[in-house]
Image: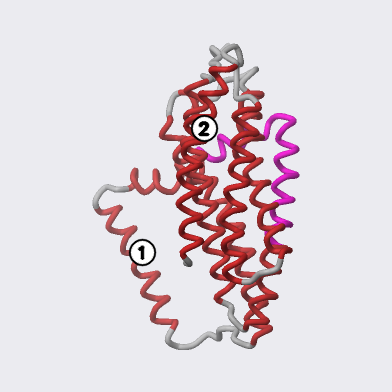
Amino acid sequence: MGDKVTISWIIFILVALVCVFSLPKIDHALFPSSTGPGAITVFGIGILFTLLTLLLFYSFYKEKSLTSGFLISAVCYSALIILVKFAFGPLSLYEANQTRSFDIMTVNPIAMFFAAVGIFLLYFLVFYIIYRIFKKRAEKAIGTESKPNENKKPRNFLKVFGFVLLIGVLIALGGIPILMLLLFSPLGASIAYLTYIFSTVIGIFMALALVGAILFVCVAFNEVKEQAIKMRDVGLITSFFWIGAAILFAYSALWFVYILIVIAVWPLKTFAPK
């Protein structure tokens, strides 16, 4: 990673943390009667995060001599993800909370960590699948597509054996509850949160934004693929994959801090069971 990209990452993290901690409190101080995050929080963080992401992708774009089409599409898909995670999601959360409570948010903050992990894994899985598709296309075009060989078989066997051995040790040590926690907590918490926020009309706009994000990320990968073919360097696609994955991870970590601060500033309503 070049010096410019590293500096951009440092700026991104520092400024993002300041925004996450300060904007909700400023919003609430200016509008103390509000029952949920307002324009200062939602649009402030959305715009600033998009500008910070632009800084990251611009550094990568200049370093790798990519096209303007890549930069535009990369920033657009990131902006849509930011819109979903930091604007539509919280707004839908408080909209749904007008009629029913969501105990995972109010009772167990640890569950929100698992929700952040689970949602990150969903984003990462989609991003990884798209990456593999375009990497295969670049390898085929360049003529460097990897072929199966006998040396891979022992390594694959060792991976499977190691995984089975780990599961066996956990079970032998009475670690089934730990294993179940690691496997199902992120899944259950993320499903609970996503089901809740997609239950409002705002959920329709979130779904459309996510579809748009997938289309833009495909365009971005295609631009990188074309450049990789010209340079005969598939590693260029891998570089974009890792910086994109790192940004997704940063979004998830920042969202976890952000949502806890938002809930602390604007507590969610609880409803007694009928």
Badge 1 amino acid: Val
Residue at 60% of width from left, 25% of height from top?
37
Of residue 222 and residue 272, the one placed in the foreground of this image is 222
Spatial CA span between label 1 and label 2 = 37 Å
Disc 2 crowd rating (10 Å Cα; few below 14, some 14-19, many 20+) is many
Q: Nearer the viewer, residue 255 or 16?
A: 16
Mark 2 = which residue?
259
The C terminus sits in image quarter: top right
Q: Give coordinates of residue 269: x percent, y percent.
A: 55, 16
Q: Does the magenta segment cover residue 41?
A: no
Q: Is 28 situated above or below 223?
A: above
Query: How far across and how far down the image is residue 38, in percent?
Result: 63, 24
Location of residue 198 by image quarter: top right
Q: Earlier in the sequence, mark 1 or mark 2?
A: 1
Structural crowding at the residue carrying mark 1, measured as other residues with C-alpha within 10 Å and reported as few (<14), some (14–19) or many (≥20): few
The dominant secondary structure in magenta is helix
**Residue wearing tag 1:** 164
**194 part of magenta stretch:** yes
Give the magenta-colored segment's residue range.
189-218
- Does 247 sit left or right of 38 as displayed? left
Residue 214 occupies quadrant: bottom right
Closer to us: 231 or 237: 231
